[in-house]
Image (spheres, grey):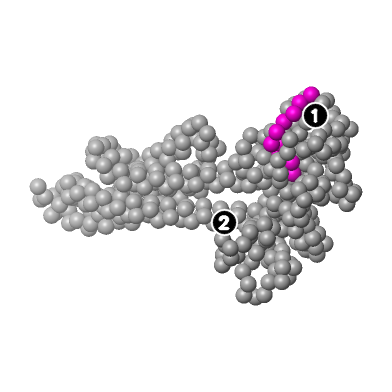
Amino acid sequence: MILIRLALQTVVLALAQLWGNKFRAILTMLGIMIGVGAVIATVGATEGLKAYVLKEFDSFGPRKVWMDGTVPRKLRGRVSWSQFDLRLSELEYLRKNCTTIDAITPMYFTGATVRSADESRQSISVTGVWPDWHEIEKRVAIKGRPLIQTDIDEIRNVCLINDKGIQELQLDADPSGDYILVNDRRFLIVGVVETKDVAQGFPGGGEARTELYIPVTTALSMQPRETVSFALAQLKDAKDAEEARAEISSIFRRLRKLSGEDENTFVVEAVQSVIDQINRLATGITVAAAGLVAISLLVGGIGIMNIMLVSVSERTREIGLRKAMGARPSIILVQFLVEAVVLCMVGGLIGIAAGLGLVAAAGQIPGSPLKDAAVPLWAAVIGVGFSALVGVVFGMFPAIKASRLDPIVALRHE
């Protein structure tokens, strides 16, 4: 009980000393305030940006793998890019032999003039896919039926339309069974899929509009051609992203007869790998911010030590009087140490409040990616903990000096 009362008295005395020298205390705390405020704002902004980006990628799907052909660097400018585009035969082989994926679809994009009985639209997005597209993109048929393998095998003139397209082409609420003309080719609408706000599932794809999805074999026969724009696959487990990249790359190299020294003529990117890179980048930014705040706290700590030394000098007679009345050196040491810690803690709390305010203000900016940004609890705890540690470390020397003053010499001090 005595220890608790002594601790409270010491803290009150420390606060009274700070209040008595408010301007000096504020200047002393400035380094701590700026350092802690900067790290809180940086961590909050980093976490907010990371959450925003990961949310976008989550809508795309962390289990997805993107594949495309590419021209080797030494051949760029000398050969056509289409020479290395993905072929249906390669994707067929991948579907049958790749053990780390459970779904795959080619993606072939083209534009077409589409006419219904009452409306005609130009430059409509037409995408050739396999039935696995429904599972990979999580776009089921909300009316009618999905595409099936028979549509692919028999190169049928069938299509799916999004609900936005129903409005633009002035079709029936359920157009399943109706016919439309795609580049003057008659197609049967077999189903309707829900419109995505982001076209094709990519972040930043823009405003959705009429979309048609047809069997990829039908799409290629309309050109004609044998290669596709790119391919999407779905992993059995997102944790196997690197293993899947290695397996898919190995299969493509074997199919394309690439030797050990040949450069890849394809690209394989797993969304989970990108997510992992984003997490590592965010961690790096946080560590860098911690380094910056450590420097700021170091500077602030030196300032606090100097001010505490000045305080010891100014209060030499007070220290001598207290010692003459029986105060032990340990009590004097604790008093000055607590003053330094309180000084740092108050500066740290003000810095945390300022950092939280900056993050909240940034989130209020229209269109800001920091709209849902929040400072994690660990950042605030670390901010307060570091502030207290700085107070202990840099307040120790002045406190020891005060506790070792000779009371007779101190009382003679002018």
| Residue at the image point whose x is 69% and y is 43% from the top | 200
Looking at the picture, tell me which residue is in the foreground, 150 or 388. 150
Tell whether position 125 is magenta.
Answer: yes
Tell whether position 360 is magenta.
Answer: no
- From this viewpoint, which residue is outermost toward the bottom? 260
Across the whole image, how many numbered discs are drawn on residues? Answer: 2
Looking at the picture, tell me which residue is in the foreground, 82 or 292. 82
| Residue at the image point whose x is 23% and y is 48% from the top | 307
Residue 273 pos. (x, y %): 62, 57
| Residue at the image point whose x is 70% and y is 53% from the top | 230
Kindly indicate the quadrant of the structure image that contains residue 174: top right
Residue topped by disc 1: 116
**What range is drawn magenta here?**
118-127
In this rendering, is residue 370 above or below 334? above
Whether residue 169 appears in this view of the structure is yes
Q: Amino acid at mark 1?
A: Ser
Q: Earlier in the sequence, mark 2 or mark 1?
A: 1
Q: Amino acid at mark 2?
A: Gln
Binning the other alpha carbons within 10 Å of mark 2 as few (below 14), some (14 to 19) or many (20 upward) gives: few
Local SS, label 1: loop
> Would residue 13 appear left or right of 241 to someone viewing this image?
left
> Would residue 189 appear left or right of 314 to someone viewing this image?
right
Local SS, label 2: helix
- Quarter placement of the N terminus: top left
Query: Of circles 2 and 1, which is in front?
Result: 1
Cα distance in 3D space between marks 2 and 1: 46 Å
Residue topped by disc 2: 277
Residue 6 pos. (x, y %): 35, 45
> Would residue 99 appear left or right of 201 to someone viewing this image?
right
Q: Main secondary structure of the magenta part?
A: strand
